[in-house]
Amino acid sequence: MKTLLEMITSEMREAFQKAGYDEELAKVTLSNRPDLCEYQCNGAMAGAKKYKKAPFMIAEDVAAQLKESSSFEAVDVVKPGFINLKLDTAFAADYLNRMAASEKLGAEEEKEPKTILIDYGGPNVAKPLHVGHLRSAIIGESVKRIMRFKGNNVIGDIHLGDWGYQMGLIITELKKRKPELPYFDENFEGEYPEEAPFTIGELEEIYPAASAYAKEHEEYREEALHATYLLQNGHRGCRAIWNHIMNVSVTDLKKNYERLNVEFDLWKGEADAQKYIPDMVQMLKDKGYARYDEGALVVDVQEESDNKEVPPCMILKSDGAALYDTTDLATLVQREEDYHPDEVIYVVDKRQELHFVQVFRCAKKTGIVPEDTKLEFLGFGTMNGKDGKPFKTREGGVMRLENLIREINEEMYKKIMDNRTVEEEEAKRTAQIVGLAAIKYGDLSNQASKDYIFDVDRFTSFEGNTGPYILYTIVRIKSILNKYQENGGSLEGIRVLPAKDEYEKALMLQTLRFNDVMDTVYEEIAPHKICAYIYELANEFNKFYHETKILSEEDEERKAGYIALLSLTKRVLEACIGLLGFEAPERM
């Protein structure tokens, strides 16, 4: 169904046309003065010059065409030429009832669904997830859900860092510690053990130890580089260790991402792109796109319109080694071959923007992706502590993600137990649900590209613009609906009625904005606008709740109308938090 703004704008276009003016002037927006009206049209101002007429006169001509409209309770013209609109409450109620009858709350899907691949997550294997991995996972998961909500075929790819120097370091350190293992015996021809020669805990200790040692010992570093070379060139023993590293590490990564309610459709990584590199490099040479610059193979991506220098995209170093540019281009070759995406969205730290400018330009210039394939960089800012610096542990180290989640859950558990509304076991489960909402909403309520302060005390508060406040609102609505049903009421067949007072109308107006908000969120890829919307919606519900006797209303039809509005408000809130990547408990 059409969004409310589309419906009002369509009626306004007709009014402009009937009054003898260009219908393009009929843009309707939410009012920036809600104390005066609910929607407004400023088109008469823009038409004054074209029609050599006072905007007030144009506005009055248009308003006259809307006198018989059933959509508006009031149409007022205010100098110098604003048209102020107040919705008719019966019209609003009818729109809400049509939303309630729709499985997706009236949301329209793409008429021509796109195949969209989203690259997010991006952890390195063999390393524990830390807070630096949080934003990519949370934002990417929400973007994936938003794109799917609009009917697209969306593929989420974690794109693991699984093929570089860190693998050589682990292999070298393992050989130093356990030289007797068959992987290091060049004469060994049997089957390698199925079980890995290390646990995830040992693996996570091996890498930093090897990395630190290599910085101090050149011979060891050379050995690690050689091990990386052997792995990348198919050495049997190195490949077997790599498989162990992948199995142990990916199992642990899946467990940690599951705690964040983040799911990937593809668990591919840099290693998967390697087989595409030789042919891609040869193509770049054969077609004259690549040139040698001081021994390195590069593709120029500078454009005439650039205000500053954009360095060439480096394909191979002077020693023939591939780089991130190479791997990311080869990954695009693979994605084009396997999925033919209409769009690829990268959810990555904004400090990598130049890298992606180079890769995108190179991919388009060389035909690695078709000209009409959209490549989009969604760069995110840094998650900082209260001191304004990147978020650290109390000891000053990088905080592991599982420790951050545990700290938040413990804080939520304490707050829930202080209220003493649920038993201990249920409180623990609820704390996990609310803790995840605190983390995700705390992140997503900020515009992705901006740095933000991760404030545990504020994010876990049940008051203010927080995840727990939104969940508490949903739980409060659930409680009212449950009591209504326990007292013999049914949620079937009930309808929203025209508003009785300003508080009910304010809640109706906010609820029916859902589809307009979702269109904006989708077009702008802006999860933070969902957060802003549901915070306003929760506020309007809570005002209505405090000012209205809902369950004690004596008029049964009126009471059922209240319940219909609350039921729809709950559905809207639940749909929104689902798109943000969390859910609400039954009780708090």
Image: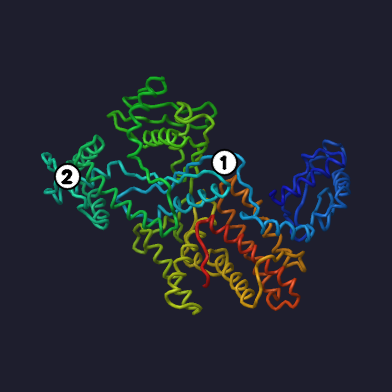
Which kind of residue does numbered mark 2 sit on? Glu
Relative to 304, does residue 155 appear above or below in the rendering?
A: below
Please state the horizontal and vertical placement of residue 147, each as a whole percent of the image.
54, 47
Q: Nearer the viewer, residue 249 or 418?
A: 249
- Neighbour class for label 2 at 10 Å: few (<14), some, many (≥20)? few
Which residue does the numbered mark 1 point to in the structure image?
113
- For label 1, the crowd category at 10 Å Cα-Cα, with few meaning under 14, some 14 to 19 and many 20 or more, is some
**Residue positioned 25% across, 55% down in the render:** 205
Report whether 98 appears left or right of 334: right
Position of residue 12 measured from the top left corner of the image (x, y, whole percent): 80, 46
**In the rendering, which numbered label is found on residue 101?**
none
Q: Is 562 placed left or right of 16 in the picture? A: left
Q: Residue at x 35, y 27 (%)?
A: 279
Which sits earlier in the primary sequence, circle 1 or circle 2?
Answer: 1
Identify the residue shown where x is 19% and y is 52%: 197
Q: Is residue 310 above or below residue 452?
A: above
Residue 168 position by quadrant? top left
Evaluate if marks 1 and 2 touch, with contact meaning CB atoms under 8 Å apart.
no
Q: Position of residue 71 (x, y in %)?
A: 80, 54
Marks 1 and 2 sit apart, C-alpha to C-alpha, by 48 Å
Position in image of residue 584 (x %, y %): 52, 65
In the image: residue 270, left or right of residue 168: right
Q: Please, what is the three-letter code of the amino acid marked with disc 1?
A: Pro
Asked which secondary structure carries label 2, the reply is loop
Task: Check disc 1 and report its element: helix, strand or loop.
Answer: loop
Q: In the rendering, which numbered label is found on residue 191? A: 2
